[in-house]
């Protein structure tokens, strides 16, 4: 109640003192659902059929000072499978700061990322229920325009509380481009440190209460070529399996990304190796399904697909240690992805009047190859050894504009998904997915989009078919209907239509949307980070407003 009172006082103060040399903004988002019984997806067996996640954010700044608060309400309960820590109504974030050209000081909650996020990233994603903001103090200092330092201390947000563990961090970025004496080249180096301090639990394994992570980075570009790389080392930390400390091991990660681009052609390749690289602000949070207390950012590096059937078998990064049985041991992953974009020129046989765009992506991920000792929960991996195959994805996308009114997309994906190693259940799936999509533009913002999909596989739940029709009546108002049908399921009662019908209306910075339909159970992923959602049926509403 005191925090809500503080929010009210700050809101009234901000409105009262808004004046020249100041800014004031308010953002509101509401995601609600009413869950229904369904003969196909089952009765709703949880408390509270109506659930709602709501966020009200207020930012105010005057001269060099800035302030912000975020009030959150999960009344009467949060949406299904969000963390129980998101409960009732309370002040989720609050901060105050002072910022000049060289100095930026923040007290309270803040988000931060060092490098590629391999050792630190705090961020918010409401769709998958992540908010791991740090609460403490952060200082950013730039003595020159090519040297930048960041120092921070905080406890990580968990629900409406904070973690037991303390997080310390330091980051430096130095732009050395001027030393190259070349107008078409850039060179940046960076060094980062993150420490997680938490009291030790009694165990027979040696490790310190302070876990250290070090990162060094280099970014270079010249003309059309670029490369960046990051190396990470993690000091010895407890390996926790089924809530028990089973060993203490070091961790490490290596990432390199490089590419080349010119008009009509782009190539981008990424390689990443991670060993025992997950770290939480509380050791006991290891492996929690709500993504709480995650200190670093280890997304799956695969293509982010846009279609319903291409997102059934999605990969999650496997940086953790797991000893399920002698035949299912994991201690990290190794692999990468390659993207190639090419535009066939206008006026050619394949390019036609408007040209044709091609995009090829392939990603492949394996377990680390090495010696494993199941009895002692120990492992010794080769640096470049490829072990059990976890996942692969090969896709080809063709985008074609036929005339001013019609354009189409043709899409093919082959996926190999090792369910045993990714989900730690059973089975391997090899699937082929084809998609055809066309959009007809009628002018004045009116358009009609059709989409047809098919997934073919002899494994798991067998074949699926899907379709979408979307009609934008005006630039502000659109409606849609889609359905995916698991017609190939061997169990007749599981041959379910997962249909949805809905629409949205936008005006200015405001958007209102409503949907009715069935949610297929599985993973919902944003930016390579996933949240499991159970199967359900219901009516949902989404409101986004900004002032």
Image (cartoon, rainbow, N blue to C red):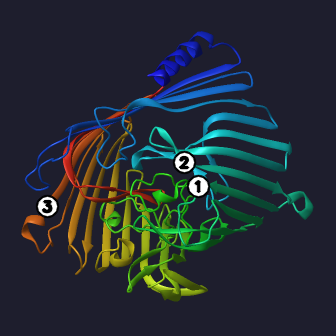
Q: Quadrant of the N terminus?
A: top left
Residues at marks 1 and 2, CA–CA distance in whole angstroms: 9 Å
The crowding category of the residue bearing disc 2, from other C-alpha atoms within 10 Å (few below 14, some 14 to 19, many at least 20), is some
Q: Quadrant of residue 264?
A: bottom right
- Whether residues under marks 2 and 3 lie with C-beta atoms below 8 angstroms apart, the answer is no
Please tell me the numbered disc located at residue 496: 3
Residue 510 in view, yes or no? no
Mark 2 or 3: in front is 2
How far from the left and from the top, in percent, is residue 112? Answer: 63, 47
Residue 77 in view, yes or no? yes
241 lies left or right of 513? right
Q: Residue at x 67, y 56 (%)?
A: 195
Residues at marks 2 and 3, CA–CA distance in whole angstroms: 45 Å
Q: Quadrant of residue 40?
A: bottom left
- Whether residues under marks 1 and 2 lie with C-beta atoms below 8 angstroms apart, the answer is yes
Q: Residue at x 46, y 22 (%)?
A: 4
**Element on which disc 2 rests:** strand
Please tell me the numbered disc located at residue 199: 1
How far from the left and from the top, in percent, is residue 403? Answer: 41, 56
**Element on which disc 1 rests:** loop
**Vertical position of residue 368 compared to residue 191: above or below:** below
How far from the left and from the top, in percent, is residue 352? Answer: 47, 67
177 lies left or right of 356? right
Mark 2 — residue? 164
**Vertical position of residue 54 compared to residue 353: above or below:** above
Q: Nearer the viewer, residue 457 or 44?
A: 44
Q: Nearer the viewer, residue 238 or 360?
A: 238
Residues at marks 3 and 1, CA–CA distance in whole angstroms: 50 Å
């Amino acid at each position: 109640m005191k925090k809500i009172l503080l929010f009210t006082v700050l809101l009234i103060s901000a409105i009262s003192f808004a004046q020249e040399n100041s800014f004031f903004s308010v953002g509101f988002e509401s995601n609600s659902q009413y869950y229904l019984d369904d003969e196909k997806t089952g009765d709703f067996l949880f408390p509270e059929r109506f659930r709602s996640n709501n966020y009200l954010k207020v930012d105010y700044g005057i001269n060099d000072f800035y302030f912000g608060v975020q009030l959150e309400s999960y009344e009467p309960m949060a949406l299904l499978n969000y963390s129980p820590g998101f409960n009732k109504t309370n002040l989720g974030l609050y901060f105050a700061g002072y910022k000049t050209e060289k100095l930026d000081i923040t007290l309270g909650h803040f988000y931060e990322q060092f490098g590629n996020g391999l050792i630190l990233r705090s961020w918010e994603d409401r769709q998958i229920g992540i908010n791991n903001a740090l609460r403490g103090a952060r200082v950013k200092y730039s003595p020159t325009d090519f040297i930048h330092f960041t120092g921070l201390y905080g406890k990580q947000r968990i629900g409406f509380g904070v973690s037991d563990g303390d997080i310390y961090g330091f980051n430096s970025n130095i732009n050395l481009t001027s030393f190259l004496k070349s107008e078409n080249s850039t060179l940046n180096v960076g060094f980062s440190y993150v420490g997680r301090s938490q009291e030790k639990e009694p165990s027979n394994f040696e490790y310190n209460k302070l876990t250290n992570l070090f990162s060094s980075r280099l970014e270079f570009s010249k003309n059309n070529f670029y490369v960046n790389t990051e190396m990470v080392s993690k000091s010895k930390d407890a390996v926790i399996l089924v809530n028990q400390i089973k060993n203490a091991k070091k961790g490490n990660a290596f990432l390199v990304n490089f590419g080349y681009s010119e008009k009509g052609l782009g190539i981008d390749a990424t390689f990443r190796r991670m060993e025992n690289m997950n770290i939480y602000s509380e050791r006991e949070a290891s492996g929690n399904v709500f993504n709480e207390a995650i200190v670093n950012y280890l997304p799956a590096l695969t293509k982010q697909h846009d279609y319903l059937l291409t997102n059934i078998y999605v990969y999650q990064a496997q940086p953790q240690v797991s000893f399920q049985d002698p035949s299912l041991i994991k201690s990290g992953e190794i692999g990468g992805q390659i993207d190639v974009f090419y535009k066939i020129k206008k006026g050619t046989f394949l390019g036609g009047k408007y040209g044709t765009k091609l995009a090829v992506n392939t990603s492949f991920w394996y377990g680390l190859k090495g010696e494993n000792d199941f009895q002692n929960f120990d492992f010794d991996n080769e640096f470049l050894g490829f072990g059990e195959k976890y996942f692969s994805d090969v896709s080809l996308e063709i985008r074609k504009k036929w005339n001013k009114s019609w354009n189409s997309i043709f899409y093919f994906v082959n996926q190999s998904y090792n369910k045993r190693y990714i989900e730690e259940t059973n089975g391997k799936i090899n699937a082929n997915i084809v998609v055809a999509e066309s959009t007809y533009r009628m002018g004045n913002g009116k358009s009609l989009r059709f989409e047809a999909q098919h997934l073919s596989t002899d494994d798991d739940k067998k074949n699926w078919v899907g379709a979408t029709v979307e009609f934008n009546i005006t630039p502000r108002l659109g409606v849609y209907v889609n359905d995916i049908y698991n017609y190939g399921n061997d169990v007749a009662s599981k041959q379910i239509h997962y249909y949805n019908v809905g629409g949205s209306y936008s005006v200015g910075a405001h958007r209102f949307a409503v949907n009715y339909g069935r949610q297929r159970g599985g993973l919902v992923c944003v930016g390579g980070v996933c949240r499991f959602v159970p199967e359900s049926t219901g009516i949902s509403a989404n409101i986004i407003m900004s002032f």
